[in-house]
Amino acid sequence: MDIGDMMVSSKVDVRHLRDSEKKFEKSHNRFIDEDVPKYRFPERRMGSRAAYQLIHNELNLDGNPDLNLASFVTTWMEPEADRLIIENLHKNFIDRFEYPQVNNIEERIVNILANLYNAPVDGNFVGTSTIGSSEAIMLGLLAHKWNWRKKRRSENLSTERPNIVFGSDTHISWDKFARYFDVEPRIVPIRRDSFMVDADTLIDHVDQNTIAVGAVLGTTFTGAFDPVIEINDRLVELKEDRGIDVPVHVDAASAGFITPFYEPEFRWDFRLEQVKSINTSGHKFGLVYPGLGWLIFRDGSLLPEELKFYVNYLGDEMPTYTLNFSRGSSMIVGQYFNILHLGREGYSQIVSKMMDNASYLALRLHQSGEFTVINDAKHIPVVTFKFSGKERFTLFDLSYKVRERGWIVPAYSLPPDAEKTTIMRVVVRENFTKDLIDIFVDDLIKSKRFLEGETIRISHRSAREGHPVS
Ligand SMILES: Cc1ncc(COP(=O)(O)O)c(C=O)c1O
């Protein structure tokens, strides 16, 4: 089937319809003459073209994904990838019996990623695709909880108060795991000066009841890396000195498709002894549309048998480890397309380009004299910055103002103990080229100028009215 056939066009193909339906489509497709049913199931039909146009028009109010500098998530794929995605939209991934090849492709990608993350060659790693990193994180940590409990039971020790240790710079999905799966979160604040967690402080929170320690590679807040090597080393010492053996789960949602290509010598993955599981988002720098994540365990024994569920597959029993049952196949196929098409060479080139563009953005912001760059894309193409001087308006105001030009760029305050610092963050994705960066920085500065002028106008007006603005 050609991609054009699948795309919704404003010309409705009525050839396959019954006569009464043809009549209906013809008479109901030209005009949209009724209020749109919003909250109740509509009693009557609407012509398909009219329904399409109504929804299409409303969605025009959404932001433009290409100008969305807030998101880590892919907004562009090659036309051949789009084509494969459309061709596989109607395959339910869980139907392994019906769609064995998509499942084979998933297995190939798990192998490819385990290899990319340096899983021991003689080991029997396992892994799965997920809907995103959140699901992958929850599944990874759940396995560690079960392993901890099993070990405690085998030693006749209490299993009552499991805890998990991570920094305040982790994504909300870590807090979600703790709450949903009843594990005490021991959240270590990031430092006010460096905006990073300290490995020693993190390890100070570990005890016999710790199911895992988290290390984030590419924090959502600044793109920085948690000190994963130091965390690993401290845990190895703890294991050797006191017999407390705690796994590290690495949240490489962002870095999982960057670091292996940009800093291949950097040891963050299964080369580190205590790193037992890793998640990454295919839909971030894996360069696939949402939603796709991956979870890899360095060894099959880390995935408790009790957490696997079996579905029939050509007469065989195939284990599954997911929270969701039905899901699409397209993104897995899209991931395989990228891997085949780009290879290490292509991913490396794209990553280098993004990093180069991110450095250029950091430089332009710095040279403007208006902003202080906090994170200049050391490990992943994310740039964070704040005002270099004191302003009478906030970065939130600036974010709002620059949105008028279509740019979506978030401002937010950092997590504890750095909550007094507000920053802006730009994720430099593949399509954010130097030309666009120039336009963006100019727009940002123009917006700032406007706010400076407007603040002065507002304060004058208010002062005259007897309400001075401080
Ligand atoms: C570090 C980190 N972990 C986890 C997640 C959650 O990932 P997903 O949106 O793929 O569920 C994100 C999302 O931005 C993230 O930045």
Image: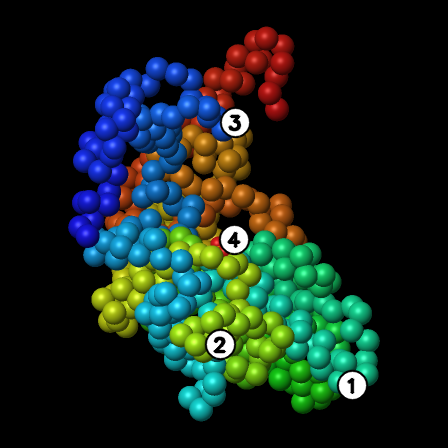
Estimate the spatial distance between the alpha carbons at disc 1 and disc 3, rounded to whole Å. Answer: 56 Å
The numbered disc on residue 248 is none
Q: CA distance from mark 2 to mark 3?
A: 43 Å
Q: Amino acid at mark 2?
A: Glu
The residue lying toward the viewer, choosing from 293 and 306, is: 306
Q: Quadrant of residue 210?
A: bottom right
In three-dimensional space, the C-alpha distance between marks 2 and 4, rounded to whole angstroms, equals: 42 Å
Is the Cβ of the residue at disc 1 closer than 8 Å to that at disc 3?
no
Q: Secondary structure at mark 4?
A: loop
Side (left or right) of 434 relative to 102: left
Closest to the observer, 328 or 351: 328
Quarter-wise, where is residue 129 in the image? bottom left
Residues at marks 2 and 1, CA–CA distance in whole angstroms? 33 Å
Mark 3 Cα shell of 10 Å, populated few (<14), some (14-19), many (≥20):
few
Secondary structure, mark 3, is loop
**Dot 4 corresponds to which residue?**
221
Q: Pointer 3: what residue?
A: 39
Q: Nearer the viewer, mark 2 or mark 1?
A: 2
Q: Is residue 190 left or right of residue 104?
A: right
Q: Nearer the viewer, mark 2 or mark 3?
A: 2
Determine the CA span between mark 4 and mark 3.
36 Å
Q: Residue at x 49, y 32 (%)?
A: 397
Q: Which residue is mark 1?
A: 155
Closer to the N terminus: mark 2 or mark 3? 3
**Labelled pair 1, 4 in contact (Cβ < 8 Å):** no
